[in-house]
Amino acid sequence: MNECALKQPQQVMSLSELSKNQRAFIRACRATGPLKAKLINMGFVPGVEVMMVRSAPLKDPLEITIHNYLITLRRAEAALIEVDPV
Amino acid sequence: MIRAALAGQPNCGKSTIFNMLAGVNQHVANYPGVTVDKKTANLKYKGQSIELVDLPGTYSFSTYSLEEKVAKDFLIDSEIDVIINVVDSSCLRRSLLLTLQLLELGKPVIVVLNMMDIAEGRGLVVSDTRLQELINVRTVKTVGAKKLGKAELLDAVIAASKERITEPFRLNYGELEPYIKELGDQIDINAEVCQRWLAVKCLEGDQSVLERTGVSAETIKDLTRRIHAIHDLDIDQAIAGLRYDNAHILYHKVVDEKSVKQDTFTARIDRVLLNRWFAFPVLGLVIYLIYELAIVWGYKLTDYTWPFLAALKNKIISFLPSGAFVDVPLVTDFGIWMTNSVIALLNYVPIFFILFALIAILEDVGYMPRMAFILDRVFKRYGLHGQSTLPLVLGGAFVGGCAVPGIMATKGIADERARLATILTVPYMNCLAKVPFYTLLLGAFFKPEMALMMFFISTVTLFIALIVARLLTATVLVNRETAPFVMELPTYHLPTFKGVALRATQRVWVYVKKVVTVVMAVAVILFVLLQYPGVASEKMAQFRSRADVAMSAFAKKAGGTSYADAVDGPAKLGQLVNLYDDYKAHRMLAGSKEAVAALDQEFQQASPTLFALVRPDNPEAKKLNRELRRLSKTNKQLQMDIKNEKITNSFLGMIGRALEPVSQFCGFDWRINVAFLSSFAARESAVATLGSIYEQGKTDLTPEESMAQDGAYTPIHAASMLIFMILTPPCIATMVVVKMQANSYRWMLFAIGFPISLGIVVSALFFTLAVNFGWSGLELMRNFYIVTALLALALGIVKTKQSGWQASRTN
């Protein structure tokens, strides 16, 4: 990723950046291959509401709520999911 | 016969439903070629026989996960009459996603609305009649744990098996429809499933469907490019999105959300168990409890089960032809050897049973994925996975465990690379059977520093495991598939007693079947290696004359007594000595006075004359009894000497000597090599072999004392042996399980070869350093510990370049 992209005004927020108990809607999933398939399977499709529950005691992985159930995923993976905070 | 497949998403309670339907008549095997459980059951209901097949839990039918591929392939290839789709009613929106895909297959589907109680508790009202109308399925409401709805479900299976679906369920794929039709026209095979479904799967680029239908990957790539150009659509996301939208619509038509309670029971428990401050103490407590209950208590339990095994052993041995002094028939030697090998492993069954039951409880409760959640960050650094915690603990992350259940517990690790790395590192943990070996060496050479040395031994193993895991994942395993760490944290459930007991029994049975058969095969090989070429004839003549001297001494004393006739000649003497030993062996197991009386009675009846000498009641007999004790001792000594002579002369002894040029760098002579070689059969035999080699002629000393006094070894030899033992490869039983879980003989051979090489290199290195710098044994061990710990920490600090997951590679 280049530096300029990060400095643009309308920054895209990723799932990993949500704070505790913050809600958001999924905008897009930038993952590929098995991760993409796995995320789609678990319900990470655009328009779905997610909520950050907590991070693990050692800060990674994260626990989030989606479709009324709990999912854990690593920060590196959550960073590939773009969200619009509510 | 009706064949019904049970499908459902993970944690939907599918196993509970399967257990409810199948009861105890379940068969567990693996799907051909893969290590995924295949559970089947045959049952009779209202005169119909039904075969149930439990498919692996899958969220969907994507291309990537092994479970999903297995389930999908089974549905495509097998003649299935009915699909039973178990859904978690409290999580219906996601569950319906799989339901819709199952409907597309074109087979009769029964939707089992499970966990209705939880759904109601959450304020969800599910209308089963609406669901029946909307997607034309049969529905059954069950609460699996309470056995509700079994008859209704079986009735539904029979009814559904009679219908044939003329027009399968169709999902409208919108803009993609023309392409699905285009593909459908190309597919011309006789499949068990609906053609349209095959076309959709082809469009998704599903490997196994492409292979079966003969559609080339090129065609799909081309099509994907076209669709992307014309409609600006990503096929995967578009199809998934459509399915979700449909599931969503269906959900809202079927479910009435009265008041969705956010603060559920699970969330409240998690607030404590996953809390930043409490998570580690609670995890530590859980691990400690498993260890205490299974390993410590299980070991105590074997004190109670051992007498039964010992009695069984005596029983088997009593059927073998007996021999005494120099002439022991080969078949007797062989029989005793085989019995000992198998019984030694069966002795661990209570430990395994408790362990497997506890694992089943943890799985059912839902704590397992949470363990992974807490520890993933640490393990990830070394190429392992959060889910590696339990296997490592079971393998003996504390003072003692067993690699067999440890490796069996790796089954659930989703990440293939981390799973293999875990399988290959669990054997480095301290298995229980290594402990006697440690105590032998520590007792002989490190008496004052025993506690410190034991601390080094029991903690260094974890560092070694982490280093090895990191090494392997960065080298030989680097191209292995890894899976994203995306896991569901299921809601907490109370486990059912029946489910736990069933699973524990099944797993113990698998262990007994697989391990015992292979151990027997290897025991035969070891027996041959130890038995042949055998004792040289002049040596044998020496033993014979020793036996003759002892016998004639006894005969002289017996001559002129009233027992002279009964003990006349070597054959009768042999019989007498065996009776004496046999009685002693049984007497050891008889606890109470009554048991002793019964035992006496039994022996008295079996051999009235000779027993008078074994249990004398007059002065003459008492005198001879003392002689008999001496004779029995000579006999035992002779057997031992012959055995040692046999080992010295055996093929294994030759191998041990042949290895001396290499092993001398570690400070091992051929005797130690033989002990290590025989420890492959089972770790215990290392101590037994060492003990018997060192016991020569000094029977009043313990093995510890005789080793220390032998003079050939110093504490640095002992420390070198300890390092080698810490690193040595798994025993046979473990190798069998490595083969089972890694599903490859190559990994099994690697699991043997790598630790041996590592052990030789590391102990040779430290032994040489110790000799050159004049370290004491304790210093050697301490330095080894410091180096290992620092290396492990350094590897943990250096960040891995690999991301948390990696795409699979194909040629």
Image (spheres, coloured by chain):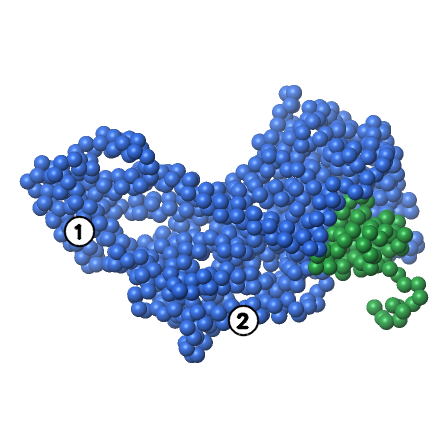
Which element type, helix, strand or loop, lies under badge 1? helix
Q: What label does residue B547 carry, if any?
A: 1
Left or right, residue B423 beside residue B96: left
Cα gap from disc 2 to disc 1, whole angstroms: 55 Å
Of circles 2 and 1, which is in front?
A: 2
Callout 2 environment at 10 Å: few (<14), some (14 to 19), or many (20+)? few
Q: How many marks?
A: 2
The front one of B34 and B272 is B272
- Residue B342 in sight from this viewpoint: no
Amino acid bearing label 2: Val
Q: Residue furthest left?
A: B560
Dot 1: chain letter: B
What chain is the blue one?
Answer: B
Q: Earlier in the sequence, mark 2 or mark 1?
A: 1
What chain is the green one?
Answer: A
Q: What label does residue B787 carry, if any?
A: 2
**In this view, B291 is above or below B169:** below
**In this view, A19 is above or below B95:** below
Please state the horizontal and vertical placement of residue B377, each as a whole percent of the image: 68, 59
Which element type, helix, strand or loop, lies under badge 2? helix
Dot 2: chain letter: B
